[in-house]
Image: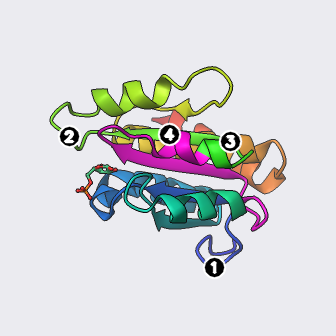
């Protein structure tokens, strides 16, 4: 299997702050396990809005196929990214504020009709599932990823 870190990235893992990294790590580990090339960026929808816009606008042309975006608190990052790209965006609500992720969950899941964000569970379990969901999406097109995901599920069934 090719090293997912050195190949052209198919999945972007974006987070609102460097401090989100530990919670998002399971997404990176799972993408690695599935052999999916990925890249990681810290982008903030409110602190670095221009950089976020530029990144989202160019992602598809650079070969990215799915964007995973983790954020805490008001958590507008996945919605803002979704507004600048046609790629599917998976939001991971992070429990980094006093409201422990309920704020992020509701912010992400309540996208008004028209610009969807697929939302997974709060925190690191959600980060892991975001990577698996990205794997399922990519598996529709890429046989190697489809097989890697099927192998993962077989292992899961063995307990
Ligand atoms: C959100 O605010 C980030 O995603 C992070 O979860 C939270 C706190 O970020 P810092 O202000 O600690 O960088 O935007």
Residue 109 position, x and y percent, is 48, 25
- For disc 2, the marked residue is 97
Q: CA distance from mark 1 to mark 4?
A: 25 Å
The kind of secondary structure element at disc 2 is loop
Q: Quadrant of the C terminus?
A: top left
Q: CA distance from mark 1 to mark 3?
A: 23 Å
Q: Residues within 10 Å of mark 4 (few under 14, many from 20)?
A: many
- For disc 1, the marked residue is 6
Residue 61 lies in the magenta stretch? yes
Mark 3 or mark 2: whose residue is earlier in sequence: 3
Q: Which mark is residue 54?
A: none
Whether residue 37 appears in this view of the structure is yes
- For disc 3, the marked residue is 88
Label 2 CB, ligand 1: below 8 Å?
yes
Whether residue 155 appears in this view of the structure is no
Residue occupying image coordinates x 39% and y 40%: 75
């Amino acid at each position: 299997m090719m090293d997912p870190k050195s190949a052209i990235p198919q999945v972007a893992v974006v987070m609102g702050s460097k401090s989100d990294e530990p919670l998002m790590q399971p997404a990176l580990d799972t993408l690695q396990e599935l052999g999916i090339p990925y890249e990681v960026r810290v982008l903030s929808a409110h602190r670095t809005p221009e950089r976020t816009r530029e990144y989202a606008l160019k992602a598809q042309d650079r070969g990215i196929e799915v964007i995973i975006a983790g954020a805490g608190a008001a958590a507008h990052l996945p919605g803002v990214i979704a507004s600048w790209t046609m790629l599917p965006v998976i939001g991971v609500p992070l429990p980094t504020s006093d409201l422990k992720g309920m704020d992020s969950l509701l912010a992400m899941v309540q996208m008004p009709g028209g610009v969807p964000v697929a939302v997974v569970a709060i925190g690191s379990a959600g980060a892991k599932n975001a990577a698996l969901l990205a794997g399922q999406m990519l598996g529709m097109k890429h046989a190697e990823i489809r097989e890697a995901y099927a192998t993962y599920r077989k292992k899961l069934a063995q307990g």
